[in-house]
Image: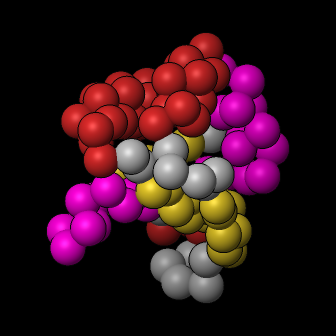
Amino acid sequence: MYIVHVHIHIKPEFIEAFKAVSLENARNSLHEPGVVRFDVLQQPDDTSRFVLVEIYRTSEDLAKHKSTPHYNSWREAAEPMMMEPRSRIIFINLFPMDKDF
């Protein structure tokens, strides 16, 4: 599995709008064959901070995701809402085994 954690800091006036566009992107992403999981998390003690946890079968599936209309709509809507550019960390899983997803 190819796991991506995307860290995002949103301008306070855009929190609700960001949640709406991110949930729409997540729902659509789950229909992609290479997407195993797509979580949208909000930090409770600083509600302007979010983490997207995206699990893809392969790195190629991440590239395919970035070419979808729903991702590009999300990116165009979300980027102006951000306090700073988003950052990401890539992981590979050790447990559970890929076959168990």
Q: Which residue is at the front of the view, 41 or 34?
A: 41
Question: In the rendered view, does 59 fall on the left or right side of 7?
Answer: right
Visual colour scheme:
secondary structure
What is the x, y in percent for residue 17? 30, 29
Q: In this view, does 2 lie to the left or right of 12?
A: right
Q: In which quarter of the image is the N terminus?
A: bottom right
Whether 32 is drawn above or below 97: the answer is: above
Residue at the (66%, 69%) spot, across then down: 89
Asked whether residue 30 appears in the rendered view, the answer is no
Residue 91 is situated, as x and y percent measured from the top left of the image, at 66, 73
Per the rendered image, the range of residues in magenta is 42-68
Q: In this view, does 86 lie above or below 44?
A: above
Observer-nearest of 61 and 4: 4
User: Which image quadrant for residue 41?
Assistant: bottom left
Residue lying at 48% horizontally and 67% vertically, measured from the top left? 100
Whether residue 53 appears in magenta in the rendering, the answer is: yes
Residue occupying the far left of the picture: 44
What is the number of callouts on the image?
0
Instruction: Please indicate whether residue 17 sits to the left or right of residue 61 in the image.
Output: left
90 left or right, relative to 60: left
- Residue at 39%, 46% (x, y): give it: 11
Residue 72 in the image: x percent, y percent?
Answer: 63, 22
Q: Is residue 73 found inside the magenta-colored segment of the image?
A: no
Quarter of image, res 13: top left
**Which residue lies most toward the top here?**
69
Q: Can I make out residue 51 in this image? A: yes
Whole-percent x, y for residue 20 in the image:
28, 29
- The residue at the point 24 percent across, 59 percent down is 47
